[in-house]
Image (cartoon, rainbow, N blue to C red):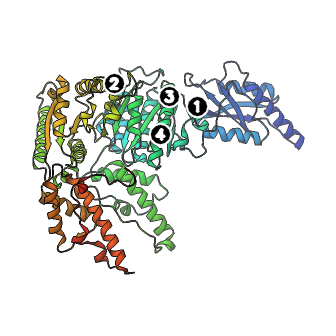
Amino acid sequence: MLFYETEILRRGCRINSEEEEKEQYRKVKYLNSRLKHLEDGPDMALIWQAEMDIISVDYGLDSDKNPDPSFPERLCRLFEKELEGEEFSPGETREITVAEVHEHRRAADNRNIFEMCYRTRRNIEYDIYNDGCYELSEEIIPEEPLTKEEAFRRAEGLMADESFKDELDRIYSEKNACDEFYGFPVHYHLVAEGLESAMDMARLLVQALYSRGRIPGRRISTVNCMDSGLSGNRYMNALFDNSAGSVLVFEMSGNEEPESSYASDFERVMKYLEKRWELHHGKTLFILVENLENPGFSKEFAARVQEFMEFVRIREGRGNAAEARAYLDRLADATRFAKLDRELAYGYLEKKKSYNPSDVHRAIEKWSRKVLREELYPAYKELKRERKRRRHKKEDAYQELQKMIGLREIKKTVDEIRAFYRLQKARERAGISSGTALSRHMVFTGNPGSAKTTVARLIAEVLSEDGVIENGNFVECGRGDLVGKYVGWTAKTVKAKFREARGGVLFIDEAYSLLDNSHSFGDEAINTIVQEMENQREKVIVIFAGYPKPMEEFLARNEGMRSRIAFHLDFPDYGPEEMLLILEKMLSEQRYHLEKDAGSRCLEIFEKACAMEHSGNGRFVRNMLERAMMHQALRLSEEGSRRISKERISALAAADFVWDGEQQDRSVRRIGFM
């Protein structure tokens, strides 16, 4: 529902006594009761303020109805009929938020010109601001029409991605019927590192749609910081019920709850939201924001609702330093600190080759805090506060892969893949068609702890950075995530995982676990995977992983499986020297170091471990280090020193590293009863 406020200009009102004022209020209260009986009137109408010169009226319409331009004039005639001797003329009309309607109803009740028990044409719940289950903000975008040229100029100012510009082309295409609202053919999935830059994109999209007649209203309602109590919440129900003709933006980051309750609680939330989106998507424009800093359950939810609604996925763009500064200038001009030192704000843009809009928003936030505390209120300039240790910037995925210990053949293959797809892109730019898209699926084989999962995640990021895949989506799953509990569920479950991984990598660990002797649900999962590998070959890269021998049986299970796999990467076990290098890398990350004889002791243990059938590889190293850290803690505590030097706290001795034979090879230490 869309809500409007119209002003009715009032002339001829004369109030000379308290009794006349009371009589005027009685008449206005009577008018309020008459509004719901207007022929062809709106779904709700309310006089919320009656001053000497202006009467303010709110009214609401279903999204299928356009605002009746004659309605203010009809109100004037009604008021002249009921309030004899007075003259009325239409004033300004504007679209308003649901929260404004709610506050106006309360104001009318306080002024004794409206009783809350009155019913309008429809019983509408206006209280959408909640009891703590989510945060909500509403805004009305500008009404001024936006030409295609202006829309693209503003998109450039936002450092827009090509996916954004492609959608503007579709919005302004002359192929579309633009004179009347029929519904929403698509909804939007915005991907950004922060809600602020996503909202900049959303506002421009909505203004462009409104300018082309593609959406009736200009109200944007943004929901974020949801928690597990959202499901069935009456305030959220009211928000959905009032959303027709407007825009609902959801950032589904969720909140930080214990992992044990998070999955089950948010499964209920997703089911609730899924039903609501399915019910309302014909009349409400939905925008899903995937916050890359904290994606929450946005990817999984997008996969669910794509069963019944189509998304246009738009990524946050990038720009050079000059474009980032221009964007920062526009954001700074919109703040209260527009006249203050802009050079200081530029200093918060980290020096790098390119920037995304979220980088600029973060710079503005830091600058605003700085000028508030040091320029406007300098008395607080010297106030000291405890600062968290600054995290190191995440390094480039390719460089991170190159720094991994060993894996020489793996790194070489990744280089070949990158070189091949760079050449394909060069051929495309040269106008040389490559025909059918080549298969990009992979198989990783190796023993536990050989870094298969880590490498798969890094490959997803590397291929995303190179533009081989649309994004760095990395969806990890196993048998339990793919095989349904009941007949008919498995195929749907597998397809949902492919949708969740769209534009990225679907990593199926221990893929051979899908094999079963019953040839039922597991086989159904395998057959569906093979089918989706072909159907989604340009959108999803599938990486299977597992032990070498069982994976051979898995690949032989379906005739079409092996032919669809382009790369088979074998992860060899680490040798003793490589395991020592892995240990040194882990020690550096944990800010520990080895004492003089500890290195040779560790190498001796690694040689014994490698002589066993399954050494445990990287997991063995990690488990041994964790045990050594506990031994060190016990050793230092038994020495009884109250104050221990930083050097001793950080040093691990040879005695801290213990070889327990086969027991040490176990990846899980069991405590309690067998």
Instruction: Please state if 581 lies on the left or on the right of 180 as rendered.
Output: left
Q: Earlier in the sequence, mark 2 or mark 4?
A: 4
Tag 3 secondary structure: helix
Q: Which residue occupies the foreground of this view, 477 or 607? A: 607
The residues bearing labels 4 and 1 have C-alpha atoms spaced at a distance of: 29 Å
Task: Identify which amino acid the numbered label 2 is placed on.
Answer: Ala
Residue found at x 14% / y 36%: 567
Which numbered disc, 3 or 1, marks the residue closer to the eye? 3
Amino acid type of disc 3?
A: Lys
Can you identify the residue that label 2 sits on? 491
How busy is the neighbourhood of tag 4: few (under 14 within 10 Å), some, or many (20 plus)? Answer: few
C-alpha separation, residue under disc 3 versus residue under disc 4: 17 Å
To which quarter of the image does residue 392 belong?
A: bottom left
| Foreground label between 2 and 1 | 2
Numbered mark located on residue 264 in the image: 4
Q: Left or right: 89 with respect to 325?
A: right
Residue 396: x and y in percent read 23, 52
Residue where numbered disc 1 is placed: 242
Callout 4, which amino acid?
A: Ser
Query: Is residue 286 depicted above or below 343 in this figure?
Result: above
Residue 7 at what x, y percent from top left? 67, 35
Residue 89 occupies which quadrant of the picture? Answer: top right
Q: Earlier in the sequence, mark 4 or mark 1?
A: 1
* Disc 4, SS: helix
Q: Is residue 167 left or right of residue 230?
A: left
Disc 3: which residue: 275
**CB atoms of marks 3 and 1 within 8 Å:** no
Along the line of sight, which residue is nearer the eye, 417 or 647? 647
Q: Nearer the viewer, residue 393 or 296?
A: 296
